Image (cartoon, rainbow, N blue to C red):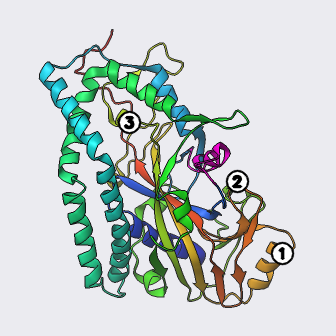
């Protein structure tokens, strides 16, 4: 028997994914179920404990699935195993290659802040554009001329002021030549990892993760874009291949989820809603995750493999993926979270007459965490004891508070993927 709740959730995911990701071959949106309310009142620049709370939010290795799940290991643990147990070939570049590398590294370092600023500014406009494009393709309002101009202007600024072309050329040179100087490459990677390691007042060690925009801006009024999902979207939105390819919903799935532990899919129970016209409206913000302790070139470098004497010589971090061909990756770390998607001012309009009394009772009497698909309605703030709750009436659900509803992840290439032409030790 067809489950309308499953269809609704999968179509909602499909439009969210289309509104957030430009290239589904290289990136994947993993949707929460339900979301996590943001911690409030933190001072991460002053308190190590607060910085540790924020850093822990995206520290777990995600499973390769459209449904947000965790594999159990920390990203920093997987990365450390590479730093400690990798093996590099005996290789050295020519003097002219070293000169080009040093020049590219210096130019990249000098212009990085400008490049990143205008890149992020463009991606914020792109989020608006992709959402409007998905709505238009589903038969809704056309993309406004102002938004098209805004997108073009943001790209032009990225090119002119963010030095987009030059920076991409520098990065290509760095990617090609850095592995030729493996001793220096791995020495710097290790130093970078240690530089961003911090300790709380209680002695807990963690890798400091930063964000753009920074934490304090998550609660301000700028930087948000609108998102909506209605009956027209439900009727016309193409289904995402990932929904069936990378995991299925529980047969008992209902749009309303209840749990004693917020965000734990293993503890969820569901309430189904009857087929009805539902409109979802909210504001979204993309928050970029900056792991300055992780050198991304390690993940694409073909000049390393796991050492034969390492604890796990046959370790595969990722077997590589080809979503278009239906090939899924396997390994210790197949995805790397790049951005968090924050939602606020959620409003769901529909017919909830039969469910509203029970949901309100579960929230008030039993203090359960309650969600609607990827959105949290009631529950604790992440890492804090403060409980939040939205309002549920017969016709409207409203949740003004900021919450994370998913993460955009990079689909990692095969790694290790050592180049057999390099002079490896026998």
9 or 104: nearer the viewer: 104
Label tally:
3
Q: Residue at x 53, y 47 (%)?
A: 63
Which dot marks residue 364? 1
Task: Report the quarter where the C terminus lies.
Answer: top left
Q: Closer to us: mark 2 or mark 3?
A: 2
Residue behind mark 2: 383
Q: Is residue 393 left or right of residue 67?
A: right
> Of helix, strand and loop, which one carries label 2?
loop
Nearer-N-terminus badge (2/3):
3
Q: Position of residue 263 (x, y in %)?
A: 67, 58
Q: Which residues are magenta?
A: 43-59
Q: Position of residue 137 (x, y in %)?
A: 32, 80
Name above or below for residue 232 compared with residue 318. Answer: below
Q: Count residues near mark 3 (Cα–Cα under 10 Å), then give few for <14, some for 14-19, many for 20+.
A: some
Q: Closer to us: mark 1 or mark 2?
A: 2
Please, which residue is most extreme toward the right here? Answer: 365
Residue behind mark 3: 299
Q: Is residue 31 visible?
A: no
Name above or below for residue 175 compared with residue 212. Answer: above
Q: Decide: marks 3, 1 in contact (CB < 8 A)?
A: no
Task: Report the quarter where the N terminus lies.
Answer: bottom right
């Amino acid at each position: 028997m067809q489950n309308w709740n499953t269809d609704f959730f999968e179509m909602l995911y499909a439009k969210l994914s289309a509104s957030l990701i430009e290239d589904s071959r290289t990136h994947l949106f993993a949707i929460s179920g339900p979301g996590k309310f943001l911690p409030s009142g933190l001072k991460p620049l002053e308190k190590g404990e607060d910085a540790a709370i924020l850093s822990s939010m995206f520290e777990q290795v995600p499973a390769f699935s459209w449904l947000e799940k965790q594999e159990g290991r920390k990203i920093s643990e997987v990365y450390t195993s590479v730093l400690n147990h990798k093996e590099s070939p005996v290789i050295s570049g020519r003097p002219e290659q070293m000169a080009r590398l040093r020049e590219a590294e210096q130019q990249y370092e000098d212009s990085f802040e400008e490049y990143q600023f205008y890149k992020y500014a463009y991606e914020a406009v792109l989020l608006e554009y992709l959402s409007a494009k998905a709505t238009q393709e589903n038969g809704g309002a056309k993309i406004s001329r102002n938004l098209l101009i805004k997108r073009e202007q943001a790209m032009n600024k990225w090119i002119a002021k963010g030095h987009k072309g030059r920076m991409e050329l520098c990065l290509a040179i760095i990617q090609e030549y850095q592995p030729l100087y493996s001793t220096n490459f791995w020495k710097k990677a290790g130093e970078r990892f240690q530089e961003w390691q911090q300790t709380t007042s209680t002695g807990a060690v963690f890798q400091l993760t930063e964000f753009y925009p920074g934490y304090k801006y998550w609660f301000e009024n700028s930087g948000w874009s609108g998102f909506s999902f209605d009956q027209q979207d439900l009727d016309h939105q193409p289904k995402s291949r990932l929904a069936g390819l990378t995991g299925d919903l529980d047969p008992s799935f209902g749009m309303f989820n209840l749990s004693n532990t917020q965000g734990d899919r293993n503890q969820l129970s569901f309430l189904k809603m009857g087929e009805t016209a539902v409109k979802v409206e909210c504001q979204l913000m993309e928050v970029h995750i900056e792991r300055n302790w992780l050198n991304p070139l390690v993940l694409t470098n073909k000049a390393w493999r796991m050492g034969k004497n390492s604890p796990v010589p046959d370790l595969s971090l990722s077997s590589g993926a080809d979503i278009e061909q239906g090939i899924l990756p396997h390994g210790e770390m197949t995805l790397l979270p790049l951005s968090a998607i924050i939602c606020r001012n959620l409003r769901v309009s529909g017919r909830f007459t039969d469910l509203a009394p029970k949901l309100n009772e579960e929230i008030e009497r039993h203090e359960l965490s309650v969600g609607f698909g990827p959105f949290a309605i009631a529950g604790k703030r992440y890492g804090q004891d403060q409980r939040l709750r939205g309002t549920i009436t017969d016709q409207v659900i409203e949740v003004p508070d900021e919450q994370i509803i998913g993460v955009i992840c990079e689909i990692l290439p095969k790694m290790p993927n050592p180049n057999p032409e390099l002079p490896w030790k026998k």
